[in-house]
Amino acid sequence: MSNRESTVGADQSRRSTPSESRFDWLVDPKLLSVAIGSLAVVVISGLVQVSLGAYSMTITQAWQAVFNPDVVFNLRAWNAFLFGGELPEMSRESLIVWNIRLPRVFVAMLVGMNLAISGAIFQAVTRNELASPFILGVSSGAGLMILLTLVVFGSLSAFLPLIAAVGGAVAFLIVYAIAWKNGTSPVRLVLAGVIVGTVFGSLQTALFFFADDIGVVQSAIAWTTGSLTGTDWEQVRLALPWTVVAVLLGVAGSRQCNVLLLGEQTAKSLGMSIEKVRFALSGVAVLAAAASIAVAGIVGFVGLIVPHMVRNLVGSDYRKLIVGCLFVGPALMVGADVGARLALSPVQIPVGIVTGLVGGPYFLYLMRKQQHMGEM
Amino acid sequence: MFDTIASITQGRNRDEDESDAAEKGSTDDASDGAAATLTGEELVLGYPTSDGPIVDGETITAERGAVTALVGPNGSGKSTLLKGLANQLAPDSGSVLIDGQDVHSLDTKALARKLGLLSQESTVPDSITVEDLVYHGRYPHRGFFEHVTYEDECAVDNAIDLAGCGHLRHREVGSLSGGQKQLAWIAMVLAQDTDVLLLDEPTTFLDLHHQLEVMEIIETLRDEREITVVVVLHDIEQAARHADSIVALRDGEIKARGPPEEVITERLLADVFEIEAEVDSTDRGPRVTPIRARHDETDESDAAESVDGDGDSDSQVEAE
């Protein structure tokens, strides 16, 4: 078995049959450098993020606060962060860093991960490189529900994250139902997504006319363009469990994604129940997108370009692609959020605007560079 | 996994197979990967977009351990028939049986362990290696969370050997020529380790070298692995030379079937392909020398106005 090390499949079960070669495909120099590079971006942007702001401190102070052993090794502190317990006493710096600035970085990481995975899965399901979490109606559904809540049912705004996520999921189901005709096809899914998106988009615009308060409009804009302003541990607590589930399912489904990419007929002749797999994977992608919408609103472009960047760097094997997305997604989000928070300081702009400003030109560059874009 | 290895060297006498297959649906213990008979009974096949059925109530039997070639002009329904046999296209009526068992009663993975299909529509991301592609052939043998087993590795090694693409093993699929790609795809369906293999125009668009290579692989499969092969071929001479049995279709109707020497006649070529040709029998099977296309409008056999030669896709033709 000379080929042993290169033939190991994606076994994602967490059973403990020991096998040295089981994850050997992960040890890919390109994937490793992507992971390390992304981690570096996250750490640097994170440090910039924690040291700058209204309460300014030096890099050293910020470092000391971040790695303050009194906080890092304090179970009560983590209990407060992750389960909403009572916060133990800590220094002013530590409080600002750990309670205000770091959670925002963590939320950015979770959002980046979710969007990237969601985009990667949607691109496999539709076999279309231009697919993103929001092409299948998720963003329009979420956006509409956000506006409805803010403008019409103001009393429900405490449940906004949940309502937004539900709206995204429901819109996706509508898209799926429209596309269904003895089974679906990638093209029909995308077209149905466009149809639903257009109708919901019009309704959103219509709702803006009924907003009587400029504050409501601003809040609606922040939600529909995606913003991390004011996020803290509560958002981490909200997104983390779903992120863990989505990431595990995404990694587990990567082999199915690979087979889906061989084309419908081939996948079918290999014995895949193609509709079930497509629906299940879409469900995972919607879950991931919903988790990010719930905490940050609709951040555009991340789900579209991150899988692209990773594909260019590590190739289109989904086992590696998904893992790569787990690193590059957070790097892009955390980096973009530095811009969103500090570029026009003290005014913060929604991070979705920054990702759009970065993502658009990058996408244009890709389009110019690549001959074939679109269908995979 | 030792079965897999053993079956390559085994090679049963083919005459035996044919007599076996006479009792259709006989239950030779198929568990050890022995060949199976594939039968399509009274198949009515059509696409949702076509007005009527393309294939209207045809019965076809692929004998166990033999190569059956489907031939016919463009739009004669041969690919449609193959899709029907492969359970890719649900028949409007009729049924497909493997060793007497209805394919609908099998779950998708169980079916994929018995019946493999190499379709024409095959896309693959350019950056995966041949080996990765071949491993996808093991999909029906693996559970959702299952790890690659020793058996999988053997099957993949065997398949790559048999398809003769060992030298391409670590190349990226995107860097291969059309012929090499086809070999990689064939290796993938071989890794599936099925009793029945359906191939849709596996030699079309390949250079002569690769055409012969593909046909040799098919013969090896039949002779050494006793796999039942159904292959759509564009080249009638190729069919005549390599197939044990030929089924000639026109307008979704089976016009003739039987061994090549009986089926490939000047009269059949005139009827089915609308060509004038000379057929000489040689020891490599009938040799066809096409002479000219026939433009005989009064021929009673083309009641349907046939529009051959323009459509590549069988699905474009609408049955009357």
Image (cartoon, coloured by chain):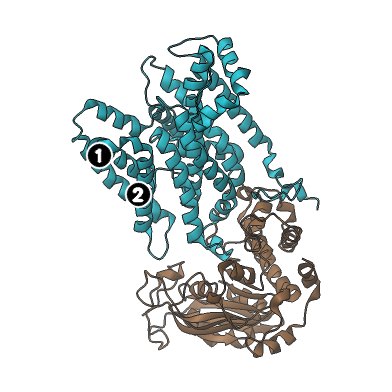
Chain colours: A cyan, B brown
Residue A301 appears in which quarter of the rendering?
top left
Residue located 51% across and 33% down the image: A83
- In this rendering, the count of numbered labels is 2
Confirm whether circles 1 and 2 share one chain: yes
Viewer-proximal residue among A267 and B29: B29
Question: Residue A171: which disc?
Answer: 2
The amino acid at mark 1 is Phe
Q: Which mark is residue A169?
A: none
Q: Nearer the viewer, residue A116 or A237?
A: A237
Residue A29 versus residue B180: which sits nearer the camera?
A29
Q: Is residue A187 visible?
A: yes
Image spot of residue B320 (x, y percent): 36, 80
Residue B276 visible within the image: no
Question: For mark 1, does the 10 Å Cα neighbourhood hold few (<14), some (14 to 19), or many (20 or more) residues?
Answer: few
- Please, what secondary structure does the residue beneath circle 1 have? loop
Q: Which residue is mark 1?
A: A153
Q: Position of residue B82 (x, y in %)?
A: 53, 73
Which residue: 32% across, 39% down?
A: A143
Secondary element at tag 2: helix
For disc 1, the chain is A
Instruction: Please state if A308 lies on the left or on the right of A173 as rendered.
Output: right
Chain under disc 2: A
Q: Residues within 10 Å of mark 2 (few under 14, many from 20)?
A: many
Residue A10, horizontal then vertical, whole percent: 65, 49
Q: Which residue is found at the position 66% from the left and 84% from the top? A: B281
